[in-house]
Amino acid sequence: MTAEETLAQIAKEVSSCQKCALYHSRKHAVPGEGPASSEIMFIGEGPGFHENEQGRPFVGAAGQFLNELLAQAGMKREDVWIGNVVKCRPPGNRDPLPEELAACDTYLERQIAAINPKIIITLGRYSMGKFMPGAKISAVHGQMRRVGNRFVIAMFHPAAALHQASLKPAILHDFAQLPKLLEQARAALKRLAPVQAEEPQQLSLF
Ligand code: URA
Ligand code: SF4
């Protein structure tokens, strides 16, 4: 199977998945979208109202802001992959439960394996927790860390920055650094010996 076919297969499984209770209340599951060749994957928390209606990630107010942040960084939304740690909307936008995160994780793991991105950008604490357990967003946001054979950058969630004006300069600054960080990641991945472990190394290279 090509990476595109693998992503399509995962999306098909997600659309009819019943592995956790969130399937009861969803209208549309949101597998995520973007090219299989993406060098960057953005990973948010879970679908909200509009995402559940449309079956697409980040199409509401937070998505509008994400589009602006990408454009300001000189990137096109169509060139990156965008998805979430849980694929179905938690009712009333409540936080996802540990069992829901655990049940849904295999889809994200398979998506990451198929795309093999150079950089994963976590948006919000649930996706940060997957790659940098115990990290504090206020301390680590915008920093690129090696995790296995790729890099992870934690960023504030665009919805949080929309609601808390004080976070806006930080998220704008972190996105503005992205082209430079992508260059660094490309160069580092050429130079670094591959490692076997996918566990976070908590190793800051830059
Ligand atoms: N917030 C998220 O975390 N994900 C979406 O897809 C939309 C809003
Ligand atoms: Fe399946 Fe994930 Fe949806 Fe739960 S949230 S039903 S595990 S796709």
Image (cartoon, helix red, strand yellow):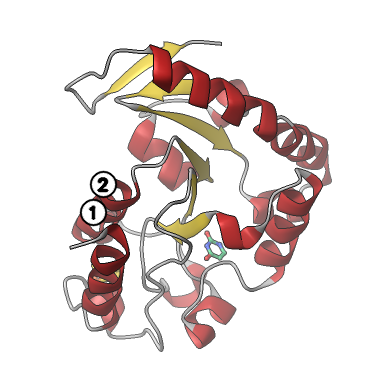
Judged left or right of residue 194, residue 35 is right
User: Of 112 and 1, which appears nearest the observer?
Assistant: 1
Residue 22 seen in render: yes
Q: Position of residue 153 (x, y in %)?
A: 52, 31
Residue 144 seen in render: no
The residue sitting at 23% across, 83% down in the picture is 16
The C terminus - image quarter: top right
The residue sitting at 26% across, 61% down in the picture is 100
The three-letter amino acid code for the residue at tag 1 is Arg
Q: Quadrant of residue 13?
A: bottom left
Classify 10 Å Cα crowding around label 1: few (below 14), some (14-19), many (20 and above).
Answer: some
- Check disc 1 and report the residue beneath it: 110
Q: Position of residue 136 (x, y in %)?
A: 52, 26
Secondary element under disc 1, as helix, strand or loop, is helix
Determine whether the beta carbon of the residue marked 1 sits less than 8 angstroms from the nearest atom of ligand 2. Answer: no
The three-letter amino acid code for the residue at tag 2 is Ala
Q: Position of residue 61 (x, y in %)?
A: 71, 69
- Check disc 2 and report the residue beneath it: 113
